[in-house]
Amino acid sequence: QKEVEQNSGPLSVPEGAIASLNCTYSDRVSQSFFWYRQYSGKSPELIMSIYSNGDKEDGRFTAQLNKASQYVSLLIRDSQPSDSATYLCAVNYNGANNLFFGTGTRLTVIP
Amino acid sequence: DAGVTQSPTHLIKTRGQHVTLRCSPISGHKSVSWYQQVLGQGPQFIFQYYEKEERGRGNFPDRFSARQFPNYSSELNVNALLLGDSALYLCASSFLTGTGSYGYTFGSGTRLTVV
């Protein structure tokens, strides 16, 4: 089983809509969860981190974590064309000094 | 404050050659991690160094090596380059070993093309 799985997309949403990105992870003791945004040809940029079950909101972004179901999601409200990018889910497992990344979901926001 | 700096930004090498990539972490950060990102995939962990000691190694062949210097900068070396080594190489710095509560700050990366 892959450590972190994401739907590679592409996911297309109209401008102003809510974009929902999902990620599942393997059955290991996990500690920290991150969402990175990566524009084409650029390096990943950290946009959200979440550590406990529930929702965490930051501006137009909401991260949701459900450890019992082993999934973490990212909601982007009022999507803008500038949100068009690949979104990477990353997990830090207890005892590991690194992040495990999913393959990313490509999001396109249509004006 | 300068972020994580990597050099060079782009590099073209021939199969069988050797390459050295360089990274300077954010000032005050003592940990440097290296990741490889092949086109269409997520970053894959190669190495982590903290206080000049290797603290983690991913599933990469021995052709890959790294080191960290007293000023916390780091080098990633790849010997006997293969076409499959073509990728974006990312350096990430953090204050402590592991990711703790901080996640990573990545540098802009080095795009390596092996021909």
Image (tube, coloured by chain):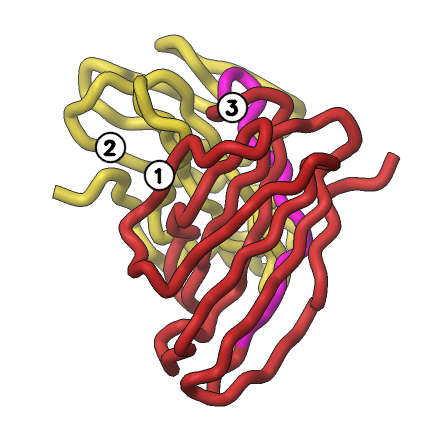
**Mark 3 or 2: the one toward you:** 3
Residues marked 2 and 1 touching at CB (< 8 Å): yes
Label 1 sits on residue: A100
Q: What element carries label 1?
A: strand
N-terminal-most mark, 2 or 1: 2
Q: What element carries label 3?
A: loop
Q: Is residue A73 left or right of residue A39?
A: left
Colour used to depict chain A in the structure image: yellow
Q: Is residue B27 left or right of residue B39?
A: right
Label 3 sits on residue: B97
Pointer 1: residues within 10 angstroms few (<14), some, or many (20+)? many
Residue A55 visible in the snapshot: yes
Q: In this view, does A4 lie above or below B85?
A: above
Alpha carbon distance from label 1 to label 3: 16 Å
Are the numbered discs 1 and 3 placed on the same chain, yes or no? no
Are the numbered discs 2 and 1 placed on the same chain, yes or no? yes
Alpha carbon distance from label 3 to label 2: 23 Å
Label 2 sits on residue: A25
